[in-house]
Image (cartoon, rainbow, N blue to C red):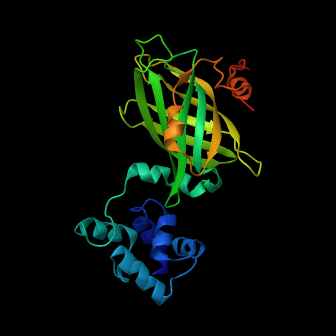
Amino acid sequence: MADYLGNNLKLLCGHYRSIAEVCRKLGINRAQFNKYLGGQSRPTPYNLKRICDFFGVEDYELALPPEQFARLLGTRPAGQGGETRSDPLMELLAPLREQSGNLSRYCGYYFEYSNCMSVPGTVLLSLVRLWEDDGNFLFERQERQERSTSTNVEAEDWVRCRYLGAAFQLQDRLFLVDYESLTLNEMSQTILIPSYKSRITRLNGLKTGVSSGDRRNPACTRVVWEYLGPDINRVAAYRQVKLYRPDDPRIDDDVRERLDVAPLKNGLFEIE
């Protein structure tokens, strides 16, 4: 069995979001399970039974040559054992999920300040919530922007945007990818420089995307995340979510300086 066990287990794990998820549901140590996958170790009879029961296969089936085992899974009626079809997108993201660091200390609410892509010359203040769900780090960003027909930044004629996305910590950087969930017509990416202080205050970064209005020009802006805490008065915070003129007293000098555009260097727009 040891000759084919690893390959057949890999095939079974491909029907789940990640190997980490399989280990968590099985209650088997990840390092030990990796030895099974690599053919370095054989499960004990007890663990083998747990694995077979979880995936809905028999122990003798795991000893079949991989090609024969794959055909067997293909003919197994849907609903028996584990899932019989993998999601290519989830498979693509699986290595990122496993490599990503722990973002627990960053969970909570933030004000996001950015130069508005839809109304150039204004500062957009958004409300962001970052949370953990079953080992994944997800976030929501709420925006309110004035309609393109309005020239008054104080107008009550607003367009609401709600972005949903996932966050990853890779090599000392925070990567956040989201999409606009109400219109489904845009995506954006934010890269933040993490805080090395014991207390998180403000994070600098860059955001790329397109205007949510008629202008669809790709754009990039500096961005500032201001940590508010794990729990806030959402109603009071949401009242502040809108567009501001750069000289508005609500935008303090520190935020204004962080959002200031830096010159290109060798064709690159970078922040430190």
Task: Give left or right: position of 3 versus 66.
Answer: right
Q: Considering only vertical position in the picture, is 77 above or below 63?
A: above
Q: Residue at x 58, y 36 (%)?
A: 190
Task: Give left or right: position of 166 versus 230.
Answer: left
In the rendered image, residue 7, in percent from the top left (x then y), is placed at 46, 69
Q: Considering only vertical position in the picture, is 133 above or below 268?
A: below
In the rendered image, residue 15, in percent from the top left (x then y), is placed at 38, 62
Outermost residue, right direction? Answer: 197
Front residue of 79/187: it is 187
Q: Residue at x 33, y 77 (%)?
A: 57
Q: Residue at x 41, y 48 (%)?
A: 89
Q: Quadrant of the C terminus?
A: top right
Q: Quadrant of the N terminus?
A: bottom left
Front residue of 172/233: it is 233
In the rendered image, residue 85, in percent from the top left (x then y), is placed at 32, 59
Q: Considering only vertical position in the picture, is 161 above or below 68?
A: above
- Residue 63 appears anywhere in the view: no
- Residue 168 appears anywhere in the view: yes
In the rendered image, residue 143, in percent from the top left (x then y), is placed at 48, 31
Outermost residue, left direction? Answer: 77
Outermost residue, bottom direction? Answer: 45
